[in-house]
Amino acid sequence: MNQKPDKLVPSLIGGAIIAGISAIPGLNFINCFCCAGIVIGGYFAVFFYVRNLPDDYPLTYSDGALLGILAGVFGAVLSTLLTLIIGFNIDQMMDQISQYMGKVPSDMENIMELLKENSNLFLMATLAMGLVTDILFGLLGGIIGISILGKKRIQTK
Protein backbone atom coordinates (compact mmCIF):
# COMPACT_ATOMS: atom_id res chain seq x y z
CA MET A 1 0.00 0.00 0.00
CA ASN A 2 1.30 3.44 -0.91
CA GLN A 3 1.80 6.19 1.61
CA LYS A 4 -0.95 8.80 2.10
CA PRO A 5 -0.09 12.25 0.75
CA ASP A 6 0.46 15.12 3.14
CA LYS A 7 -2.62 17.03 4.28
CA LEU A 8 -0.77 20.32 4.78
CA VAL A 9 -0.60 21.54 1.17
CA PRO A 10 -4.26 20.78 0.30
CA SER A 11 -5.30 22.45 3.57
CA LEU A 12 -3.24 25.53 2.75
CA ILE A 13 -4.86 25.72 -0.69
CA GLY A 14 -8.31 25.38 0.88
CA GLY A 15 -7.38 28.03 3.46
CA ALA A 16 -6.19 30.37 0.72
CA ILE A 17 -9.52 29.92 -1.05
CA ILE A 18 -11.36 30.69 2.20
CA ALA A 19 -9.18 33.75 2.80
CA GLY A 20 -9.58 35.05 -0.71
CA ILE A 21 -13.34 34.72 -0.65
CA SER A 22 -13.59 36.16 2.88
CA ALA A 23 -11.25 39.14 2.52
CA ILE A 24 -11.78 40.43 -1.01
CA PRO A 25 -14.46 43.13 -1.03
CA GLY A 26 -17.44 42.17 -3.14
CA LEU A 27 -16.45 38.53 -3.33
CA ASN A 28 -16.97 38.20 0.42
CA PHE A 29 -20.75 38.47 -0.08
CA ILE A 30 -20.66 34.78 -1.06
CA ASN A 31 -20.38 34.09 2.67
CA CYS A 32 -23.82 35.65 3.20
CA PHE A 33 -25.23 32.38 1.85
CA CYS A 34 -24.56 30.14 4.88
CA CYS A 35 -20.80 30.81 4.74
CA ALA A 36 -20.65 29.21 1.29
CA GLY A 37 -17.14 30.52 0.60
CA ILE A 38 -15.80 28.77 3.68
CA VAL A 39 -17.57 25.53 2.78
CA ILE A 40 -16.08 25.80 -0.73
CA GLY A 41 -12.59 26.14 0.77
CA GLY A 42 -13.09 22.99 2.90
CA TYR A 43 -14.38 21.15 -0.15
CA PHE A 44 -11.37 22.13 -2.25
CA ALA A 45 -8.98 21.01 0.50
CA VAL A 46 -10.50 17.53 0.10
CA PHE A 47 -10.48 17.85 -3.70
CA PHE A 48 -6.74 18.51 -3.84
CA TYR A 49 -6.07 15.78 -1.26
CA VAL A 50 -8.08 13.14 -3.16
CA ARG A 51 -6.37 14.16 -6.39
CA ASN A 52 -3.01 13.06 -4.97
CA LEU A 53 -4.28 10.01 -3.08
CA PRO A 54 -3.17 6.61 -4.41
CA ASP A 55 -6.00 4.46 -5.80
CA ASP A 56 -5.40 1.66 -3.31
CA TYR A 57 -5.62 3.89 -0.25
CA PRO A 58 -9.00 4.13 1.49
CA LEU A 59 -10.57 7.45 2.38
CA THR A 60 -12.35 8.15 5.67
CA TYR A 61 -14.66 10.85 6.92
CA SER A 62 -12.02 11.74 9.49
CA ASP A 63 -9.71 12.67 6.59
CA GLY A 64 -12.32 15.12 5.32
CA ALA A 65 -12.99 16.48 8.79
CA LEU A 66 -9.30 17.08 9.46
CA LEU A 67 -8.75 18.69 6.07
CA GLY A 68 -11.75 20.97 6.60
CA ILE A 69 -10.60 21.98 10.08
CA LEU A 70 -7.05 22.70 8.91
CA ALA A 71 -8.35 24.68 5.93
CA GLY A 72 -10.52 26.66 8.36
CA VAL A 73 -7.58 27.49 10.62
CA PHE A 74 -5.41 28.55 7.70
CA GLY A 75 -8.31 30.46 6.18
CA ALA A 76 -8.95 32.44 9.36
CA VAL A 77 -5.31 33.42 9.76
CA LEU A 78 -4.81 34.24 6.08
CA SER A 79 -8.04 36.22 5.80
CA THR A 80 -7.07 38.28 8.85
CA LEU A 81 -3.73 39.04 7.20
CA LEU A 82 -5.42 39.84 3.89
CA THR A 83 -7.87 42.12 5.67
CA LEU A 84 -4.91 44.03 7.08
CA ILE A 85 -3.28 44.30 3.67
CA ILE A 86 -6.43 45.24 1.76
CA GLY A 87 -7.43 48.00 4.09
CA PHE A 88 -8.48 47.27 7.63
CA ASN A 89 -6.40 50.17 8.91
CA ILE A 90 -8.89 51.85 11.22
CA ASP A 91 -6.73 54.93 11.73
CA GLN A 92 -6.73 55.80 8.03
CA MET A 93 -10.41 55.01 7.71
CA MET A 94 -11.33 57.25 10.64
CA ASP A 95 -9.16 60.08 9.35
CA GLN A 96 -10.86 59.86 5.96
CA ILE A 97 -14.30 59.88 7.55
CA SER A 98 -13.54 62.98 9.57
CA GLN A 99 -11.95 64.65 6.49
CA TYR A 100 -15.06 64.11 4.36
CA MET A 101 -17.57 64.89 7.07
CA GLY A 102 -16.01 68.18 8.08
CA LYS A 103 -17.27 69.01 11.54
CA VAL A 104 -17.97 65.78 13.38
CA PRO A 105 -20.39 65.62 16.32
CA SER A 106 -18.62 65.11 19.66
CA ASP A 107 -20.24 61.70 20.24
CA MET A 108 -18.96 60.52 16.88
CA GLU A 109 -15.49 61.85 17.68
CA ASN A 110 -15.47 59.83 20.90
CA ILE A 111 -16.46 56.68 19.05
CA MET A 112 -13.80 57.28 16.40
CA GLU A 113 -11.12 57.77 19.06
CA LEU A 114 -12.23 54.56 20.78
CA LEU A 115 -11.93 52.69 17.49
CA LYS A 116 -8.46 54.14 16.85
CA GLU A 117 -7.22 53.24 20.32
CA ASN A 118 -8.52 49.68 20.12
CA SER A 119 -7.76 48.74 16.52
CA ASN A 120 -5.61 45.79 17.63
CA LEU A 121 -8.45 44.54 19.80
CA PHE A 122 -10.80 44.62 16.80
CA LEU A 123 -8.23 42.75 14.74
CA MET A 124 -7.97 40.05 17.40
CA ALA A 125 -11.76 39.83 17.57
CA THR A 126 -11.82 39.42 13.80
CA LEU A 127 -9.33 36.57 14.05
CA ALA A 128 -11.23 34.89 16.90
CA MET A 129 -14.55 35.04 15.08
CA GLY A 130 -12.85 33.87 11.89
CA LEU A 131 -11.40 30.87 13.69
CA VAL A 132 -14.79 29.84 15.05
CA THR A 133 -16.73 30.22 11.82
CA ASP A 134 -13.99 29.03 9.46
CA ILE A 135 -13.33 25.88 11.47
CA LEU A 136 -17.02 24.96 11.74
CA PHE A 137 -17.90 25.61 8.12
CA GLY A 138 -14.56 24.30 6.83
CA LEU A 139 -15.34 21.06 8.67
CA LEU A 140 -18.72 20.96 6.94
CA GLY A 141 -17.06 21.55 3.57
CA GLY A 142 -14.54 18.78 4.23
CA ILE A 143 -17.27 16.28 5.06
CA ILE A 144 -19.28 17.33 2.01
CA GLY A 145 -16.13 16.92 -0.09
CA ILE A 146 -15.54 13.40 1.20
CA SER A 147 -19.19 12.52 0.59
CA ILE A 148 -19.07 13.73 -3.01
CA LEU A 149 -15.52 12.90 -4.10
CA GLY A 150 -14.87 9.71 -2.22
CA LYS A 151 -18.03 7.64 -2.74
CA LYS A 152 -16.17 4.58 -4.00
CA ARG A 153 -13.24 4.90 -1.64
CA ILE A 154 -14.83 5.65 1.74
CA GLN A 155 -14.22 3.32 4.63
CA THR A 156 -16.61 3.84 7.52
CA LYS A 157 -14.26 2.45 10.17
Image (tube, helix red, strand yellow):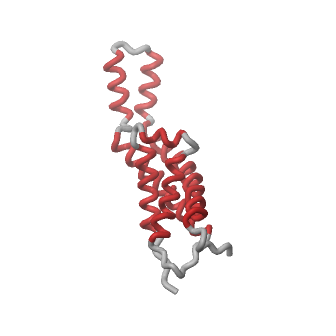
Q: Provide residue 138's location: percent of width, then percent of height.
A: 55, 55
Instruction: Estimate the x, y position of residue 152 in percent, counting from the top left.
Output: 60, 72
Query: Is residue 76 or residue 144 the one in the foreground?
Result: 144
Outermost front residue: 152
Q: Quadrant of the C terminus?
A: bottom right
Residue at the image point whose x is 64% and y is 74% from the top: 155
The front one of 5 and 123 is 5
Foreground residue among 66 and 87? 66
From the viewer's perspective, is 157 left or right of 125? right
Q: Residue at x 46, y 58 (%)?
A: 14
Image coordinates of residue 78 in percent, x first then y, are 41, 52
Does residue 44 lie above or below 125 as drawn?
below
Question: Could you tell me how many numbered marks the image carries?
Answer: 0
Residue 3 left/right relative to 154: left
Q: Position of residue 143 (x, y in %)?
A: 60, 61
Question: Where is 94 relative to 157, above or below?
Answer: above
Question: Residue at image x 45%, y 29%?
Answer: 114
